[in-house]
Image: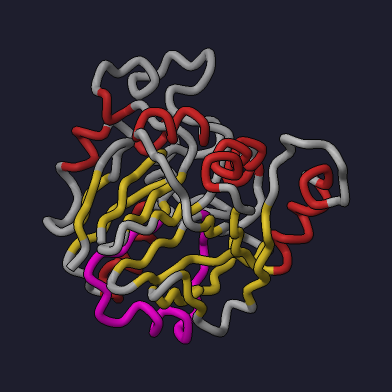
Amino acid sequence: MKITFLGTGTSQGVPVITCKCPVCQSTDSRDRRLRTSALITTDDNLNFLIDIGPDFREQMLRQQVMHLDGILITHAHRDHVAGIDDIRAFNYTQNCKMQVYANKTALDILQRDYHYIFDYHEFPGLPEADLHCLSGDDPFKIGKHLIMPIKAMHKTMPVLGYRIGNLAYITDANFISEEELLKLTNVDVLVINSLRQTKHFSHYSLPEALEIIKLVNPREAYITHMSHEMGLHAEVEKILPSNVHLAYDGLMVSVN
């Protein structure tokens, strides 16, 4: 199994429009970050997308993704779901509805904000999706692959991370209970969000993310959902533990 980081930036992306800070002016390609999303590719060639933000179309074209077998939604903030209209291309080529998995909070928002997708309609060409409501407590399968939801909090919003085999992916969290952390036992690769180096009200800071990584003790860990306030990729990498890295757009990581 491998994970491809399609986007590793926060809601504004990096560079931020009109910003003249050193990160936004950087010529290092690793400092250019689309909105956060990831593609999981399994050993039997299934593709699972984690989140479908406003850069979805560009991400699919850039990585030349030709099929999708399901979309796992962490939560329904715009930077994580605003690309859902473009599933219509996969509806057409795969001749089926897209399978979308999320908790009730996220599904309620999706059905409200993108009602034209989910309401009855007679218009050809609109996106089509089947929604699957996840409690956060029970694992589910896509094909032969068992997926374990991981409950977390994004300030007051319940969000879901996902464990697929020995990969765990958590974004937009600033709290995970001890009980949910147990679901991460023996993961090979952990992906976790960190907005910046200083404390934030709804996202892990870098020190807080490093503390979670230390508790979980994966072989490798990758930081995602970073704002320009995190700092230059090359400089931040120097201060990280040897098994922790900043992810960047286009990075592919194999999972044992």
Residue 52 in picture, x, y percent from top left: 55, 45
* Residue placed furthest toward the left: 242
Is 170 part of what is drawn in magenta?
no
Q: Is residue 141 above or below residue 182?
A: above
- How far across and down, in percent of the image, does residue 239 sit? 18, 46
Magenta stretch: give its range: 172-192
Quarter of the image for the C terminus: give it.
bottom left
Give the quadrant of the N terminus.
bottom left
Quadrant in the rendering for residue 5: top left
Residue 255 at x, y percent in the picture: 21, 63
Looking at the image, residue 191 lies above or below residue 149: above
The reply, left or right, for residue 58 in relation to residue 197 is right
- Name which residue lies at 25% across and 80% down: 186
Nearer the observer, 163 or 100: 100
Question: Which one is nearer the viewer's eye here, 254 or 130?
Answer: 130
220 left or right of 209?
A: left
What residue is at 50 percent from the left and 74 percent from the top? 149
What residue is at 78 percent from the left and 60 percent from the top? 108
Q: Is residue 42 left or right of residue 65?
A: left
